[in-house]
Image (cartoon, rainbow, N blue to C red):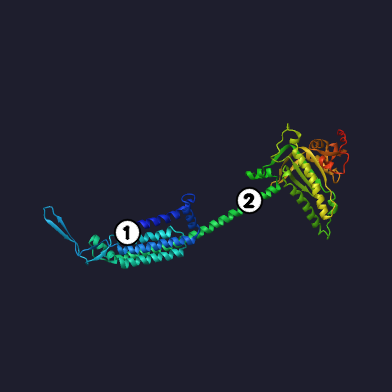
């Protein structure tokens, strides 16, 4: 019919476009840009998805009803006779039962019901809508198909068996059985639809809970990593976080060229009092925390990248240089290359003095730093399984601690070997003399005055152009 000729290509084109729109979200990088945009909107906007599905259902209903009315393939005559030639040449005539004349019939009227069932299945399984909307559409399609079976094609359904098998007895009208099939299928699909909705919502909640737990785990991991990096130096933290370590496994490493700094405030003990004015000493500890925090903030500067804070003991601040992965020891390297980190550590010590001076101006205090620097081989490692602590041991550490404890407030004391190295970096020293060091005897020590370039512009020292002080060998 003309109707079928018009509907077939237009319907095929419309269904192809809708299929492309719905398939494009599966591969958003494939296909024309317009289809990809429409597919993305179809995936993200429920209203657009509902509109397209309603359009498809309406088109199906209109075409289904109109095709039923137009599809009168032929009209049965009152009776049909067939002539057959027998084996002996005689003619045999068979007459089929007669029917009411001019009964409009369809070739396969039961296919209309099957089409409706397919539509219901596609609506239930292939669309992502609320079960209430699916329930409404299922009822509409079932009612429309029931109307078609019981009115438009009732005669064709009732006489289908008669036309096909020559049987005129009917226990139940064929139109009723086809309608019952549609109703049963619709009820089953409604129940399945509800179960799919429950399962989908449950899976969504589980997925959301999993995502929340995953975010919490990731956040907790970041916090744990930050805590580990605050407790341990970066290269040591990577060692423990990179692999699964046992509690009994130790971490230690020997270094040949490391700088060690001890910086203490000897007059802080006189400042600390546990009385009501200082809130039982709490205000004193708060002030000390601000000082140490300002020291730690200096290590964030790029110029001090090779310096690592080791620990604080009371008001004593301990730092070291040459422990990072960037400081590769080469015994044949020039002094300015091999001990560049020691110059950084010395500059860090001078910056600590400036920082404390600024704090004194703001708080109206008069704290002084007493510092000692030494260089040489050490052994560093992590001790403790539950509360790990990174520390260092060796003669270099002991001598640096003695340089601090035997020094003078406001000064940086070093041994002769350290002074000789730092002079290569234009640092100026003043000889102090022999100092008795426990376990080492008498050592020749020097006080750091500063950089030569800074002291030339300062009126404090006027003898910088004079020959340096002649050192005496340590006894």
- The image quadrant where one finds the N terminus is bottom left
Q: Which residue is mark 1?
A: 4
Q: Quadrant of residue 379?
A: top right
User: Taking 402 as reference, is 15 left or right?
Assistant: left
Q: Which residue is mark 2?
A: 221
User: Taking 339 as reference, is 191 left or right?
Assistant: left
Q: Quadrant of residue 21?
A: bottom left
- Secondary structure at badge 2 equals helix
Compare residues 151 and 278 and report the one nearer the observer. Answer: 151
The residue most toward the top is 332
User: Taking 46 as reference, is 400 left or right?
Assistant: right
- The image quadrant where one finds the C terminus is top right
- The answer to whether 426 is drawn above or below residue 207 in the figure is above
Q: Residues within 10 Å of mark 1 (few under 14, many from 20)?
A: few
Q: Of label 2 and label 1, which has the lower sequence position?
A: 1
Cα separation between marks 2 and 1: 65 Å
Q: Residue at x 36, y 64 (%)?
A: 62
User: Taking 199 as reference, is 309 left or right?
Assistant: right
Visible residue check, residue 230: yes
Q: Position of residue 278 (x, y in %)?
A: 82, 58
Q: Position of residue 314 (x, y in %)?
A: 79, 50
Compare residues 51 and 126 and report the one nearer the observer. Answer: 51
């Amino acid at each position: 019919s003309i109707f079928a000729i018009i509907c077939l290509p237009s319907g095929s084109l419309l269904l192809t476009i809708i299929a492309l729109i719905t398939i494009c979200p599966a591969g958003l990088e494939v296909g024309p840009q317009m289809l990809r945009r429409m597919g993305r909107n179809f995936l993200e906007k429920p209203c657009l998805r509902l509109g397209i599905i309603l359009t498809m259902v309406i088109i199906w209903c209109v075409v289904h009803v109109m095709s039923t009315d137009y599809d009168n393939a032929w009209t049965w005559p009152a009776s049909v006779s067939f002539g057959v030639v027998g084996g002996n040449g005689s003619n045999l005539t068979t007459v089929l039962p007669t029917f009411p004349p001019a009964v409009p019939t369809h070739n396969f009227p039961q296919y209309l019901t099957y089409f409706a069932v397919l539509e219901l299945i596609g609506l239930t399984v292939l669309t992502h809508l609320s079960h209430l909307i699916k329930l409404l559409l299922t009822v509409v399609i079932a009612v429309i198909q029931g109307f078609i079976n019981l009115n438009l094609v009732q005669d064709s359904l009732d006489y289908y068996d008669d036309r096909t098998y020559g049987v005129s007895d009917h226990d139940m009208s064929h139109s009723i059985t086809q309608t019952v099939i549609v109703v049963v299928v619709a009820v089953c699909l409604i129940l399945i639809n509800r179960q799919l909705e429950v399962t989908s919502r449950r899976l969504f909640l589980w997925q959301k809970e999993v995502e929340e737990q995953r975010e919490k785990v990731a956040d907790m991991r970041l916090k744990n990593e930050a805590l580990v990096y605050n407790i341990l130096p970066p290269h040591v933290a990577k060692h423990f976080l990179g692999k699964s370590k046992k509690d009994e496994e130790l971490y230690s490493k020997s270094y040949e060229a490391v700088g060690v700094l001890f910086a203490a405030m000897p007059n802080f003990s006189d400042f600390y009092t546990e009385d009501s004015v200082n809130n039982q000493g709490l205000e004193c500890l708060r002030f000390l925390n601000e000082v140490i925090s300002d020291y730690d903030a200096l290590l964030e500067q790029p110029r001090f990248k090779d310096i690592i804070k080791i620990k604080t003991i009371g008001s004593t601040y301990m730092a070291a240089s040459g422990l990072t992965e960037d400081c590769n020891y080469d015994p044949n390297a020039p002094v300015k290359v091999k001990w560049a980190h020691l110059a950084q550590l010395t500059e860090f010590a001078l910056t600590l003095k400036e920082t404390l001076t600024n704090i004194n101006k703001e708080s109206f205090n008069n704290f002084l730093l007493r510092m000692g620097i030494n260089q040489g081989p050490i052994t560093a490692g992590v001790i403790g399984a539950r509360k790990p602590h990174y520390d260092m041991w060796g003669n270099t550490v002991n001598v640096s601690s003695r340089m601090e404890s035997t020094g003078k407030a406001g000064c940086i004391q070093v041994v002769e070997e350290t002074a000789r190295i730092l002079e290569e970096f234009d640092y100026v020293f003043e000889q102090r003399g022999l100092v008795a060091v426990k376990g080492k005897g008498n050592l020749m020590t020097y006080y750091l005055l500063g950089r030569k370039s800074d002291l030339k512009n300062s009126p404090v020292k006027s003898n910088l152009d004079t020959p340096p002080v002649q050192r005496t060998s340590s006894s």
